[in-house]
Image (tube, grey):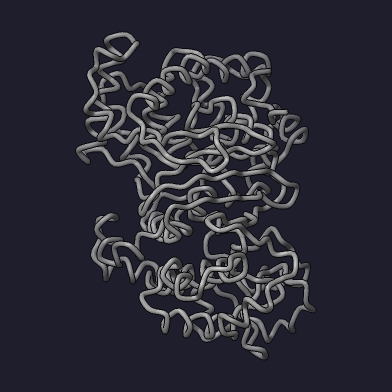
Amino acid sequence: MQKGMHTDTERCVRAVQSKDARFDGWFFTAVLTTGIYCRPSCPVVPPKAENMVFHPSAAACQQAGFRACKRCRPDTSPGSPEWNQRADAVARAMRLIADGVVDREGVPGLAARLGYSTRQVERQLLAELGAGPLALARAQRAQTARLLIETTDLPMAQIAFAAGFSSVRTFNDTVREVYALAPGELRTRAPKNAPRTTPGVLSLRLPFRAPLNPDNLFGHLAATAVPGVEEWRDGAYRRTLRLPYGHGVVALTPHPDHIACRLTLGDPRDLTVAISRCRRLLDLDADPVAVDEQLRADPVLAPLVDKAPGRRVPRTVDAAEFAVRAVLGQQVSTAAARTHAARLVTAHGTPVDDPEGGLTHLFPSPGALAELDPETLAMPRTRRTTFTTLVRRLADGNLHLGADSDWPETRALLLALPGFGPWTADVIAMRALGDPDAFLPTDLGIRRAARELGLPSTPAALTARAAAWRPWRAYAVQYLWATDSHPINFLPV
């Protein structure tokens, strides 16, 4: 699968005719005779090839006048893997749009974050996705609106503003145009098994491309969970969320064909952002078939991939938080890192209410941490300097970590900080910035796995050997880590 797949008509037709779910989110099929658009795996009888045209996004289909299919619900496809495996301006723009930046700051705000003019951003998005930033954000608002309509009892006016619409009239017009149904009709026709919720709680299903191995994904999150901020309970990973309009609590439970997501939000306007961040946390938009195919070509990795295919990279909902935790974890055990983080949470975190109990705080913001007395930190003086420099740079904006970060540029900025070596910079690149090719050749677990598998164990030699794994070295790290008996590799019981 490759960039611009929608231009390969023959390949797209084959995918539609075989109802191949692996291609969902890579492109969308618009049917000329019916005026609807579908995901490739739509269960209806495929249209004739001459009646199909292909678009790179749902927004492009809507711009061309097509309505969403009521059977396959293409707006609920997993996101395109393109935006999580690239670091160019278009990919960074798509990650920011998913994070709600256009709704909060407009197209000028999006362009400013990317360092381009609004005209340049619009031109690049239109060229690659067939739709500009406003149309892409509008498609996302429509999807959020449908989710709220079908799974909550909120009044339509509240849904309109929670989904990001500026008026109820615009909300009504958009829903009718995209789904060919009025909002009230969508609620009436909602699937009988659609999860209904208690007030203030939203239950939904997060789709992904199969296979997905939950062991290391949830195992890592549970084993490193910071008390008060995160926990594993009743088969679910739970944590607090710092969001643009307030805070939230999420519970994520793995199932064979989806991730169950239960959200409690202080402000419903944070729904889109919360979903986007949970998807990034669990790496749900990855293309595991492409990743595993590349890694399986190496005879050393092939048995590891065949044993447990579909490993994801456990990421984060807050890049700044993860960077702080990476520094706390330098040269100490997982348990010690959790202890350091828990002390900071108790002393400087923001208290929150958890309806289910167990979670007590948001992780401290960089601003709050920048004000603490370094002498209160139970760590060596050199690491205190590393910690205080990092939080000060994050707090004053001289270092920005987020969905829009340029991976090579940000890695260079991190390496320039005192106490930042390759391991700290690369683990932040891998888990906080989402670089799928970040590699950890100096990591003790990786070097131990390399020795046991007969791979070179020195960082330079292992890096040279790992060139064949590019651009998926972060996923190779997960397979190598999984050779160890550490709790991060096992789904908690």
State whether residue 121 is above or below residue 276. below
Quadrant assignment, res 492 = top right
Residue 353 or residue 254, whichever sits in front: 353
Specify whether residue 85 is in view: no
Is 369 on the left-hand or right-hand side of 341? left
- Across and down, in percent, residue 6 comes to 57, 70
Residue 143 or residue 350, whichever sits in front: 350
Residue 458 or residue 419, whichever sits in front: 419
- Across and down, in percent, residue 396 comes to 19, 38
Report the number of discs. 0
The residue under the point 54% across, 72% down is 58
State whether residue 206 is above or below residue 350. below
Specify whether residue 472 is in view: yes
State whether residue 344 is above or below residue 128. above
The residue under the point 46% across, 47% down is 248
- Locate the C terminus and report the quarter of the image it occupies: top right
- Locate the N terminus and report the quarter of the image it occupies: bottom right
The residue under the point 44% across, 70% down is 136
Is 414 on the left-hand or right-hand side of 138? left
Quadrant assignment, res 54 = bottom right
- Across and down, in percent, residue 443 comes to 50, 19
